[in-house]
Structure formats: structure tokens, C-alpha cells
């Protein structure tokens, strides 16, 4: 029963405790690159925003919770979180202990799209998968993601995800 | 039509004056009691600037445009209304809901129009989006994702006693107004984080808001003065409408030319080539006054937008959801 499941594929109530969930976000080359640029900031006080549109998600809150677990590795513990949701759309606003504030907007059941923004004290970073792409006829970001392998160590346990879902709710 | 300008404290005053000129409307009088600004205005416009309300209202004028510090909107609107002048007032309308109500009531009492200056409603991209929504292209609106980020304007904008609030007040009202306009629904609740990140002062320069409207539409909004002086443009006004049929993203300043400059600290600039929305705002105000019709953007609209910004401050202060 061990192994990893993408958070997009997981229906939370059916995830076995021995499984680990991985965030697709953690495999995006743009996120990995942005993360290293943000890490160079002297202060983490800034605004981090992501826009995540996914063609499918069995349990949207799980997707957001696992993304947040990835992001908190960069910005520290979650101090406060607000969430608003609709069947097809979910928004979370987060205040991290180091002073970063974050907003993430998710839409489900639509063609893939991803945006990332960091407005920091030393740099502004932006990425938009509709704009920053190599080909007009295919989603190269999505293709590039396939080359990055996540292993079980980068995933999160049922307990960790449960705690985050509770915090968000 | 004779227009009087009341204060040039707000930088939009010059743009509005330019829009009047383009429409062949005469600026008949200017009031400004800041002596250095008044001296400059006399050079720029070639007319004597009135330093007192008494001399200003002795001029023959039909309507006024108020572009003072936010804290003086109340006082100027009251003077103008009592002198029977129609009013276009810069946003935010006032610093409190009580002040907004006083302004609305004094204008009703003296039978003059009060229009709030929300030029984004006249941006061609935003107007096009409104048409698509009204036509049913996006289906039912589920959510909005909006931004209004800019550079720190400095001066009185970062003096809380004159501005009443920082980036959250300055840059929330536009997009709340647009979302109200698109949905026909009022803000029901707000959750917000507000902070001072990008400058040394005490006034807020950033805020992330989550909004729920009475009709169930949810929204995220990023309001800030987070853009550095050497950023390619002053800032942005962006809205994404997520509907049951599709999502449409509209960037009010998306139509621009990218220019790379050699040997300049600001080596990339985005030069806007779209339509002048201030021209549309002024044109609409003039038409309202000429036809004595209800303004397309009322004092009530201005008040509702201020209300949402004040709810954001309260939410951030209490660290909880604020409901109307």
C-alpha cells in the first residue's frame, strides 16, 4: 500500500494512511526556480500569489492543502488562514509566521493554467503559463513538469495533510 | 459649461483638467489654498487661483471637480453643495461611512449631483468585459480575481491624517466598484491581511482581501504600493472573471508598448497605448450635469466601495472575518 499519489488524483477519504501525497506544484520547474530566487531575499515579508487551474481534482481542498505544505517550507509556519470555496473555485489567504502573506486561487475542471507572483522587498517575480511558454500549440510547462521526478520523501503523510486541512477550514 | 477645480493635491487633477481641455470645456476657476501649488497652477493654467472658498464660489461656475487630500473631500463637497454646484469627487469618497452619508445628504438637500470618480468604469477593456458578462458569455459569475498594485505615491498619501488609509484604501475601492458593477450585488463579508512591507512609514502599503458578495460570488484582491520606482510601469488594474461557462481575464493597461532603454536605471518601460479612461469619466460627468440626469457612478457607489476597504482594515485588525 506504500507509494505516492498526486494530490490531484486523490480523493481524500480514500487515501490510505501508508500513502504519501505529492503536490504537482513541487514539480513545476518555475516554482523550483522562483523558490530559490525568493530564498535570496533578506526578508520574507512580501506577497506571494499563485493561480492554479487544474483539469481535474477529486478533492480540491486536498490539492490546496498539499500545495500549502510545499509553500510553508519556504515561508515558515502558517499563522492564520482564511478559505472561501465554490464547487469549481477555491481561494485561500494565508499569513505566515515570517510575515509573508499569500493568496492562492484554484479553479477545477478547466484546461491547465498556472501563475506565480512574488512581490518582495528586493525583487518582483512573475510567471504566467499562457505568456511564458515556448510553443503556442502545447503547454510546455506541463511537459517540463514531467521531467521532474518527485519521490516519496517530497510527499506528505495523511497526518500532515489532515492537519493542514483542519487549519484551512 | 463652466467648471471649477477644487485643489490639485491629487495627481489625477491634471489628467482631469487635460480631459476638460480636450472636450473644449473651460476651467473657469481653481481653488487651492496650498501656496506653492497655487503659484505653480497660476503658471500652468494662466488664471488667478483662489485661496479662499468665498472668492472661489464668487466665480461663475456650474460644477466642480474635487481633487484634494482625502480628508478634505467632506469639507469641499459641503461647500460646493451649499453653493449649488454639481460635484465630481475623487475617490475614496471619504474616510468614514458617516462622512460619506453627510456628503450624499448635503447634495440631495441642495439638489446637486454627486458623482464619484471611478475612471476604471470607463476603461475600454473593462467596458468590453462588462458587455461580455451582460451578454452571457461567461455564464453565471462564480468568482473574481483582481489586482490593483502601484508605486508608493508619497506626499500626503502616506500621511494617515490626510489620506485616511494607505494602499488598501487607495487601491481597493476601484476594484470593489467594478465587481459591484459587474454583479449588481453588495459586499457581504471581508477577510484581509494588511501590512506595511515596502516602505519605512507606518501607513499600510499592502493588503490581500477575500470578499464574498451577497449573491455568493467570491473574490480575491491584491491591493498594494509594491511596485518599485524603476518598475516598467506605474502599476496594474487586472480582473479575472471566473464564470460557469468560461474564464475571462482583462488587463486595463494590457495594451502597451515595451521599450528597452540603454543606459537608464529604468531600462524597460511599458508605455500605455490604450484609451484614456479619464476622458470617458469627465465626458460622462459633463453629460450628467448638462442633462441633469443621475450620475452613472453615484455617491452611494463611492460609499459602498469605502465600506469594503474599511471592512478590510477591521478584519486585519481583529484577525477575523468582518460581516456587514
Image (tube, coloured by chain):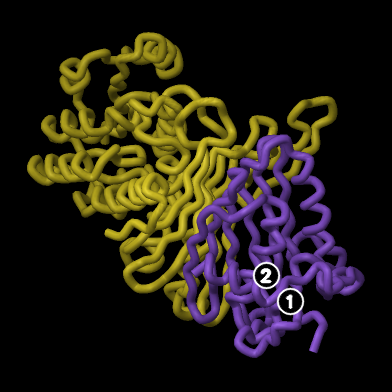
Chain colours: A purple, B yellow
x, y percent for residue B243: 51, 76
From the viewer's perspective, is B41 left or right of A18? left
The residue indicated by pointer 2 is: A66
Write the residue at 48% across / 61% down. A82
User: Which of the chains bears the disc numbered 1?
Assistant: A
Callouts 2 and 1 close, C-beta under 8 Å = yes
Mark 1 crowdedness (10 Å alpha carbons): few <14, some 14-19, many ≥20: many
Q: Residue at x 68, y 48 (%)?
A: A118
Between discs 2 and 1, the one toward the N terminus: 1
Q: Residue at x 65, y 82 (%)?
A: A57
Q: Residues within 10 Å of mark 2 (few under 14, many from 20)?
A: many
The image's mark for residue A21 is 1
Same subunit: marks 2 and 1:
yes
Between B193 and B124, the one lying in front of the other is B193
Where A11 sits versus A128, above or below?
A: below
Q: Position of residue B118 (x, y in %)?
A: 39, 47
Pick the front one: B198 or A69: A69
Q: Quadrant of residue B324?
A: bottom left
Quote the CA–CA distance across marks 2 and 1. Answer: 7 Å
Amino acid at each position: 500500500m506504500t507509494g505516492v499519489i498526486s494530490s490531484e488524483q486523490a480523493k481524500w477519504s480514500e487515501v490510505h494512511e501508508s500513502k504519501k501525497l505529492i503536490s504537482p506544484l513541487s514539480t513545476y520547474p518555475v516554482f523550483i526556480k522562483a523558490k530559490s530566487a525568493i530564498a535570496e531575499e533578506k526578508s520574507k515579508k512580501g506577497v506571494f500569489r499563485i493561480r492554479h487551474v487544474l483539469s481535474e481534482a477529486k478533492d480540491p481542498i486536498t490539492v490546496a492543502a498539499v500545495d500549502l505544505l510545499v509553500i510553508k517550507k519556504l515561508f515558515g509556519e502558517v499563522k492564520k488562514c482564511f478559505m472561501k470555496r465554490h464547487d469549481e473555485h477555491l481561494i485561500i489567504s494565508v499569513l505566515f509566521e515570517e510575515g509573508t502573506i499569500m493568496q492562492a486561487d484554484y479553479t477545477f475542471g478547466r484546461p491547465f493554467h498556472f501563475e506565480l507572483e512574488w512581490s518582495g522587498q528586493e525583487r518582483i517575480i512573475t510567471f504566467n503559463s499562457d505568456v511564458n511558454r515556448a510553443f503556442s500549440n502545447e503547454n510546455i510547462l506541463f511537459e517540463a513538469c514531467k521531467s521532474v521526478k518527485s519521490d516519496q520523501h517530497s510527499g506528505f503523510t495523511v497526518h500532515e495533510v489532515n492537519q493542514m486541512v483542519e487549519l484551512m477550514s | 459649461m463652466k467648471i471649477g477645480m477644487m485643489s490639485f493635491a491629487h495627481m489625477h487633477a491634471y489628467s482631469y483638467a487635460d480631459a476638460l481641455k480636450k472636450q473644449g470645456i473651460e476651467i473657469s476657476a481653481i481653488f487651492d489654498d496650498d501656496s506653492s501649488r497655487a503659484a505653480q497652477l497660476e503658471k500652468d493654467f494662466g488664471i488667478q487661483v483662489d485661496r479662499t472658498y468665498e472668492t472661489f464660489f464668487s466665480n461663475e461656475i456650474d460644477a466642480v471637480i474635487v481633487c484634494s487630500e482625502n480628508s478634505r473631500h467632506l469639507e469641499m463637497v459641503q461647500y460646493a453643495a451649499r453653493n449649488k454646484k454639481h460635484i465630481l469627487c475623487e475617490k475614496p469618497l471619504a474616510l468614514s461611512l458617516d462622512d460619506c452619508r453627510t456628503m450624499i445628504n448635503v447634495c440631495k438637500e441642495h439638489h446637486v449631483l454627486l458623482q464619484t470618480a471611478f475612471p476604471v468604469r470607463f476603461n475600454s477593456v473593462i467596458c468590453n468585459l462588462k458587455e461580455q458578462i451582460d451578454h452571457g458569455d461567461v455564464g453565471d459569475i462564480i468568482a473574481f480575481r483582481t489586482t490593483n498594485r502601484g508605486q508608493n505615491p508619497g506626499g500626503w498619501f502616506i500621511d494617515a491624517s490626510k489620506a485616511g488609509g494607505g494602499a488598501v484604501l487607495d487601491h481597493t475601492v476601484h476594484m470593489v466598484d467594478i465587481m459591484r458593477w459587474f454583479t449588481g450585488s453588495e459586499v457581504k463579508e471581508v477577510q484581509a491581511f494588511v501590512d506595511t512591507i515596502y516602505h519605512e512609514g507606518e501607513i499600510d502599503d499592502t493588503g490581500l482581501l477575500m470578499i464574498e458578495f451577497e449573491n455568493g460570488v467570491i473574490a480575491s484582491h491584491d491591493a498594494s504600493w509594491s511596485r518599485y520606482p524603476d518598475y516598467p510601469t506605474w502599476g496594474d488594474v487586472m480582473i479575472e472573471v471566473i464564470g460557469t461557462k468560461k474564464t475571462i481575464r482583462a488587463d486595463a493597461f494590457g495594451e502597451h508598448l515595451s521599450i528597452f532603454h540603454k543606459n537608464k536605471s529604468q531600462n524597460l518601460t511599458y508605455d500605455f497605448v490604450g484609451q484614456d479612461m479619464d476622458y470617458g469619466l469627465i465626458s460622462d460627468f459633463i453629460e450628467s450635469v448638462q442633462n441633469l440626469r443621475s450620475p452613472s457612478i453615484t455617491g452611494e457607489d463611492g460609499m459602498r466601495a469605502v465600506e469594503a476597504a474599511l471592512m478590510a482594515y477591521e478584519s486585519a485588525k481583529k484577525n477575523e472575518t468582518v460581516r456587514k
